[in-house]
Structure formats: structure tokens, C-alpha cells
Image (tube, helix red, strand yellow):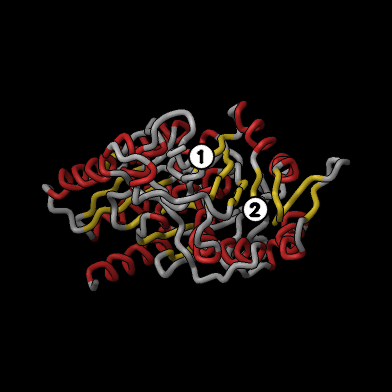
Amino acid sequence: MILKADCIYFPGDRPCKPHKTTGVLCPDCDLYTPMGFRILIIKLDAIGDVLRTTSILHSLKKKYTDSYIVWLTKNNAKDLFKNNDLVNEIFVYENIATETNLDVEEFDLVINLDPSPVSAALATKANGKEKIGFGLKPNGKVFTFNDEAIEWFEMGAFDNLKKANTKTYQQIIHEICSLDYDKGEIIVKLNDVEQKFSDEYLKNLEKYNFDIIIGINPGASDRWEYKKWREDGYIELINKIQAQYNACILLYGGEEEKELLEALSSSSKNIISTGSNNSLRQFIALMNVPQIFITGDTLALHIATALKKEVICLFGPTSYNEIEDYGRITKVVPYELECLVCYKMTCDFVPNCMQVITADMVFEQVKQKINKIKNG
């Protein structure tokens, strides 16, 4: 048989891309790469957490140089991996075939970094010679596969430990996997079409000779109401920016932010809403346009970080220490409040953490970012 069925490029039921592109057969193909050390990573949600977990891929590939990496995630996160050449294959949780794949396929290493019962059950079910992170016992309770996962497990169980933590999420997941941590970047890559779209969007704005283009993502998921800053805070901030700079403000958000984007769009001059019904990939391509990005602790923070933007992030109920700043993220935190990092869904404190953050606090960071960009 001339077919080399163990090659990473061979999909099994159709010709591989190298053959379709050049007509080459396996015996003469320079791209033949046998599948090596097989790793399954399980990270289902949330989308932002899935994205920031991609930072572990650099260290994994460095340690397991011939590895073939499969990532199991939910359907709403799968597009994050487009153009990510460190992940060989995606298993989608909602696809019925995924369960069959987990029954049949064998992995050298299974990594589950999420102690949710669903993820833990999948990690337990998967066939792996070694397992890291979290599994599920027959009584339905989550347990740790390895001692290095205990710290993260207990942080999820006890709010005081979560609040006291000073490690970044990236450092924590590297420690769980016993990997060297050298601040590997979160991975998002635009394809040629997306890059061209982003470039043309920017080119249209450049006709107006703006001094700076600033993106603002004012929303957050409904689960975390207090990740959102005040609408009047954003309006005051925008007015301060426009009073001192010839700036273009681009607004970002989803369907749930439609009314907020409309309100902010009409609050001052040179404000453009990028729309509230973009696909995930369109959202990412549009986020590539501004030089500075202002957001709460949301998916947009991790996308802007992956796109290597200068970021200003506003924190309240969630951990600012968990965010790796990569030398580009400035954190606006009302440090004077003892209740910070409460991880509460609701709050009856007046004023609450997001009300304490002022437009002047954020504007001061905007000025510093603009100076940093101007000074190269």
C-alpha cells in the first residue's frame, strides 16, 4: 500500500490537501508527517476562557515537539481555532460523533483544566495513558488527576483563596501541566480575507486623518452584571477624549449591547458602532482596527490581548491578578475597596466597584497609552 494513513494531513475519507493541491502521492510527499504524541485538551467554555487557554500551546509544543493536539470545545468557541496551526483537530462537544471518537481514539495525554462536572466527565471517559487536571468519580464528584491541580481546584471552591491569589491564569495552567511558563501569548490569527477586510476598514478611517483610533467594548455577559462599567462613565470618558484629541471611537458589542451601542454612538462626534450582530470572526477582524482598546474583563479583553493591542481593562468583581498583562494591558482597579474580587453575581453596595471607577481614572490611562504609541 502506498497510502501512509498515519500522516497528520490524511483525513481518512477524502484526499489530503497536499494531494489536492499538487497531485503528489505519499511515497514522494515531502510533507508526510506521522502522527506523534497525541494530546487531548478539554476546554469547553466560556469563550474568553477557551481563548486565553490557548496560551498553553507554545509550552506544550516546546515540550512535546512531535505532538498532535486535539482540542475539545463547544460549538460557539470552535471558530477561535481557525488558522491556529498549533491545534491539529477540533472535537465539538455538541457533535454526536465526538462521543464516538472519545470511545475509540487513544491519547498519550489528556488535559482538562476545568473542574466543571461536564468537562471532568469527558476527561474521565477519554482514553489516555496519562491525565492532568480534573476527572469525575462514579459518585458524580470532581477529583484531581494530579497534585498540581489541587491549588486551582480549591480556588474554585473557596472565594477567599481566589481573592488572595496573585498568580495569573496562564501561570496556573502551566503549573497544573508541569510546563515551564515564559508568558506564551494567547493565539488568534486572521486569515488573508479577514486581514484584508481589517486593513480596508482602517484605510477608510485614515482618510479622516484621526490622531488615534480607540476601540471600546462597553458590555459583558449577562452572568456578570458588574463586569460592566457605567454608561454615563463611558459618555464622560468619550467626551474627555474628544475634547483633547482628534480621535475616532469604534464601539463593539453583541446583540445584548445593541441599545447601549446606539446610545453611545449618539453621545459625541466621530463615534462609529461596528455593529451588534457580527460573527465571532468578523468581531475579531474588526477588533484588529483600533490602536487602543478599552474593555471590562470579557472575551474582548482576551481577543485584544491576542491581537497585541494596547489595552485598558476595568476590573471589579473578578480577579485582576489572574490577567497576564504581557506589558500591554493597563488595569484600572478601585484598590481602595476591600470587597474587590468578590465573584458575586449581584451587589447591593452603594457605590459598587464599577461605580467607583471614574472617567478621569480611565482617561489618565488613555493619555498614557497615546503617549506610548506616539513615542514608539
Mark linked to residue 89: none
User: Residue shown at 50%/62% (left/top)?
Assistant: 65
- For this rendering, which residue is in front, 119 or 226? 119
Within 10 Å of disc 1 (Cα), the crowding (few <14, some 14-19, many 20+) is many
Residue found farthest to the top: 96
User: Residue shown at 75%/61% (left/top)?
Assistant: 146
User: Residue shown at 29%/41% (left/top)?
Assistant: 194
User: Going from the N terminus, do you reach mark 1 or mark 2 first?
Assistant: 1
Residue 264 image position (x, y, % from top left): 35, 41
- For this rendering, which residue is in front, 57 or 222? 57
Left or right: 26, with 39 as reference point: left
Q: Secondary structure at mark 1?
A: helix
Toward which corner of the image does residue 237 lie, by quadrant? bottom left
Amino acid under disc 1: Ala
Question: Image quadrant for the C terminus?
Answer: bottom left
Q: Secondary structure at mark 2?
A: strand
Q: Is residue 106 above or below residue 359?
A: above
Residue 142 image position (x, y, % from top left): 80, 48
Left or right: 56, with 176 as reference point: left
Residue 296 image position (x, y, % from top left): 48, 52
Which label sits in the foreground, 1 or 2? 2
Amino acid under disc 2: Asp
Residue holding disc 2: 108
- For this rendering, which residue is in front, 9 or 375? 9
Q: Is any atom of residue 141 visible in this view?
A: yes
Residue holding disc 1: 77
Residue found farthest to the right: 139
